[in-house]
Amino acid sequence: MNPPRISRRTALAMLSGAMLAGCQRADDGAIRIATPQFSPALADPFTGLTLPDTLLLDNLYDALTVLEASGEASPALASEWTQEDPRQWRFHLRTGARFSNGRPLDAHAVAAAFKLLKTPRGRRTSIGSDLTRVREMRATDSRSLVIRLEQPEPLLPALLSYFRIPEARAYETLGPGAFSTRPVGSGPFALDAYSGNAMKLVAQPHPWRSPLSERVELLRTPDRTARLQAVLSQTAHAALEIAPDDRAALASRGGRLMPRMSTSVLVFFFVEREDGPLADRRVREALNLAVDRQKLIDAFLLGRTSPANQLSSDDGFGRHPELKAIPYAPERARALLDDAGFGAGLPISLVAAVGASAADSAVFQQIAADLRTVGVTLTIKRVPPATIREHLYRGDWPGDLFALRTGGFDSLRSFRLASCDWIAPWQCHPEVDSIVDAARRSTERAERRRLTERALAAHREAYGALYLWQEPTFDAIGPGLQGWTATRAEIRLERLRLTA
């Protein structure tokens, strides 16, 4: 059996790691984790929905609920809840929870924290914009919290998993900027020190989620090779977002590559200009049939995901369970293109963010190769991630497709952007929008699920995107680190410990 191949980049990282090993090892008892970035908002609890931003936030703060891998909400600060009518819920809180400054975290504290989200600034935050349907949170006693809604929201318990609760008095006294570097939460850790490239966390004195280790350090390491090198040299115990082909290097040093499934689906959205080729459904279907998704997954993602056939992750609420897989059918793709008038060839361009995922460059090049076999020439335009956001809001796409990671625990979230009503729509399918609107108005969970399934099926029928796959991410775990588990957008640091 041939040994696994190691890339030149990985070999260089191994050499650098060997030179550092033994002289800079992380052996002082602190668990060190290399992460690609810190959130620009640092420890502001009302920002950040995905890793790596939530690595810090979910371990400084608690929410009323936690979102499990299944997409269902489970108890966290709230021990139970009931829906009293379509616009009112009652949550019962656990006893004994305290903030790191010793103040009690009870129903009154939650209500005070929610008032911060109702300020003009709070409404503009990512968490505030997700909770616009919540009108009021009111404590009826120290354990009971009544939540009144502007509109029914059957998925409220899941949404509340993003509402991280700060100590409101400290937040108001310090202001959002200072609080983001001196946060007060109830999570297992408190922020002890911050510099531009490091955050030092210590076990807080009043946790209800008691950590197994006293200290954790987060190291901002934007370069992927440097993150791998940190684990190989044992200057870090773990690193987020490592390339799949780093598995052999890690294994050679006693480490391992841990897959982590995100809640996002990678798609190429079609910019459906009236006079453009992608306004023709036959062309959109042909592009879907021309890509061999399973071959790409096996070659570049270690076979750790499956081909997508809709705008939903495998465990997204409302995912349609009966939509058929999109086959790899290049001959059928060529026939559709010929029928649409592009038998002589079709040049198109893709706008994609630079370095958004470890294997993106190789994957996109292979997709271009697949498309060439049916007469489609795909030019790839790489731009900074911030530029994708700018085009989303301006609508001035310099290409015919753009790569986007979309989805979440609620499959309807994708239709906030992919809609006729978006501020700068790139596609408009009224038959899809009408179903989405009905789903958003639904008051019952079962009806919401049924209508979401219909919306996903309608978008697939229109071939509104080139559906690729649910995104796996890979983390590097060094020898001696135990307890690493990742569910959706959360890594629970209190479960980590070092072994000899």
Image: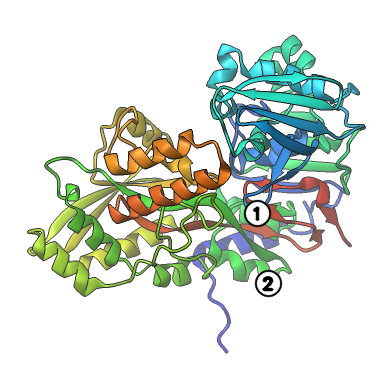
Looking at the rendered structure, the secondary structure element under dot 1 is: loop
The answer to whether residue 410 of the structure is visible from this angle is yes
Looking at the rendered structure, the secondary structure element under dot 2 is: helix
Q: Contact, CB < 8 Å: mark 1 with mark 2? A: no
User: How far across and down, in percent of the image, does residue 183 sit?
Assistant: 76, 24
Q: Nearer the viewer, residue 437 or 45?
A: 437
Residue in the image at 19% along x and 57% along y? 283
Q: Is residue 8 above or below residue 140?
A: below
Amino acid type at image mark 2: Ser
Q: Nearer the viewer, mark 1 or mark 2?
A: 1
Q: Please state if 430 lies on the left or on the right of 66 as rendered.
A: left
Residue in the image at 69% along x and 25% along y? 147
Q: Nearer the viewer, residue 421 or 444?
A: 444
Q: Nearer the viewer, residue 232 or 251?
A: 251
Q: Which residue is mark 1?
A: 69
Q: Which residue is mark 2?
A: 252
* Tag of residue 185: none
Residue in the image at 80% along x and 48% along y? 31
User: How far across and down, in percent of the image, does residue 441 sit?
Assistant: 47, 33
Q: Please state if 418 lies on the left or on the right of 339 as rendered.
A: right
